[in-house]
Amino acid sequence: MIYPVVVPALGATGGDFALVGWLVQPGAWVEQGAPLFVVQTDKADMEVEAFRGGYLRTIVIPAGATVSVRETVAYLSDSRDEPLAADGIETPQAPLATGAAPRSSASYSSLNSCEGLLEAYRHMVLTRRFEDHLYALFLQGLVPGTLHQYQGQEAVAVGVCSVLESGDAVFSTHRPVGHFIARGCPLRSIAAELWGKATGCAGGKGGQMHLTNMQIGAYPSNAIVGANIPIATGAALAFRLSRTNRVAVSFFGDGATNIGAFHEGINLAAVKNAPVIFVCENNHYAASTHISLSTRVQQIARRAEAYGIPGHTMDGMDILAVYQATREAVARARAGEGPTLLEFLTYRYAGHSRGDPGGYRTKEELQKWRELDPIPRCREVLMRQYGASAESLQLIEDECQESVEDSVEFARSSPNPASGELRAAVYASGGAQ
């Protein structure tokens, strides 16, 4: 089959780009994810990777030309012999899977058991496969908007959410997909929201940065850095006042720890003894700024000392370390002993967003963190400690891939929101119109 290579929406303004140069010659085989060509956007020179493996059959747009978003610049093919006639060129569509049904809620046993760790492994793999698949589609110009991806950080989301009960509340960020999958939001509804469809978890009104599913305790994700911290504190105060024994969890990155909402939210939670867990996913970069350039303290968790609450720094690439630290913090909160600040050292493999080339970090640094990948580490524990077979784990991975492809087909075939829904849910029922 012949596959068009298009220019993804990498720039902030959506304008035309300069095609700086090609990195692969026609006739050469290129691996999925390998750089194909370089474009100059309104941000920087950026490499565009191959969305799949194949032979670079022909270059349509030469180096030095101006190209537009979603313009076809070349063609890949499965072999060197396939004809390039116009009627032989097809844009591949995501197939509808017939295997595993989408999951609608997360249910974890103790991660200190084989059953619980297998379920955690499933959720981490599902997140990774979904994010990787989205990126491949993004490179083909098939995903509307941008993406803030979660590859590399899966152990934090799954390890934290595996401890929570159905009545607990999760508050997420502009990078919410991993948190929502870990919490049990149906994958179809997440995918549909990314495509802005009526079947999305926010009815197509939120997009990738504003997921929501109140039925499972996943409150609307907030794209403003650190803004969910005082909101989670408020929810936790409501839980305490109503004596419900529920807890709230606030996820945020290292960049959020230097803004006022971080200090105000944690201080109020400490003063009021609110049952809230503050989870800092320290991936070392606030967009492109390394933590060493913005923060003097070596461990963000030490800032808890200023508020008189516990703070712990843990390996965020080890799901069992995340699980154990969160279990202790949640038990403390339910016992009425107040908040905890947990800092998990982790790493995002992708750029801040899909328009970020990541030139501020070295390939050696990225490789070092990839060697700590939480998914192979979890797989190793399952095989070594619990005797899980490679075949059984491969079956889980295959089922996850089927669910991913099913969710994307569902999203792309779902209806757009009706025009009459434009003003729906703007006001509370019975409020001003």
Image (cartoon, rainbow, N blue to C red):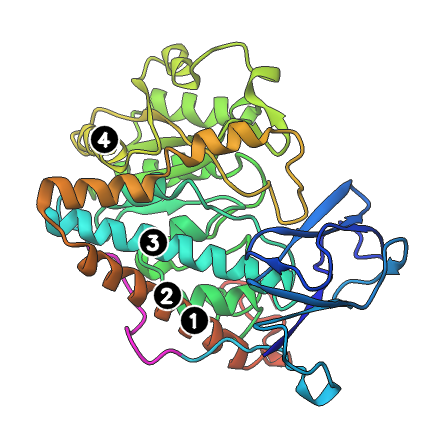
How much space separates mark 2 and mark 1, taking CA atoms? 6 Å
Please give the residue where the numbered disc 4 appears in the rendered image: 333
Where residue 185 is drawn, which disc sits there? Answer: none
Q: Tell me if residue 207 can be seen.
A: no
Residue drawn at point x = 56 percent, y = 16 percent: 292
Q: Regarding mark 3 in the picture, which secondary structure is present there?
A: helix
**Magenta highlight on residue 104:** yes
Binning the other alpha carbons within 10 Å of mark 1 as few (below 14), some (14 to 19) or many (20 upward) gives: many
Q: Is residue 238 above or below residue 401?
A: above
Q: Earlier along the polypeptide chain: callout 4 or callout 2? A: 4
- Return the residue nearer the eye: 272 or 295: 295
How much space separates mark 1 and mark 4, taking CA atoms? 39 Å
Please give the residue where the numbered disc 1 appears in the rendered image: 405
- Contact (Cβ within 8 Å) of mark 1 with mark 3: no
Q: Is residue 358 above or below residue 72?
A: above
How much space separates mark 2 and mark 3, taking CA atoms? 9 Å
Where residue 125 is drawn, which disc sits there? Answer: 3
- Contact (Cβ within 8 Å) of mark 2 with mark 1: yes
Q: Regarding mark 4 in the picture, which secondary structure is present there?
A: helix
Three-letter code, disc 2? Gln
* Residue 57 at x, y percent in the picture: 70, 69
Binning the other alpha carbons within 10 Å of mark 3 as few (below 14), some (14 to 19) or many (20 upward) gives: many
Please give the residue where the numbered disc 2 appears in the rendered image: 401
Q: Regarding mark 1 in the picture, which secondary structure is present there?
A: helix
Three-letter code, disc 3? Val
Three-letter code, disc 1? Glu
Q: Regarding mark 2 in the picture, which secondary structure is present there?
A: helix
Side of 61 relative to 54 (left or right): right
Q: Tell me if residue 248 can be seen.
A: yes
Look at discs 1 and 4 and give the one toward the viewer: 1
Q: Earlier along the polypeptide chain: callout 1 or callout 4? A: 4
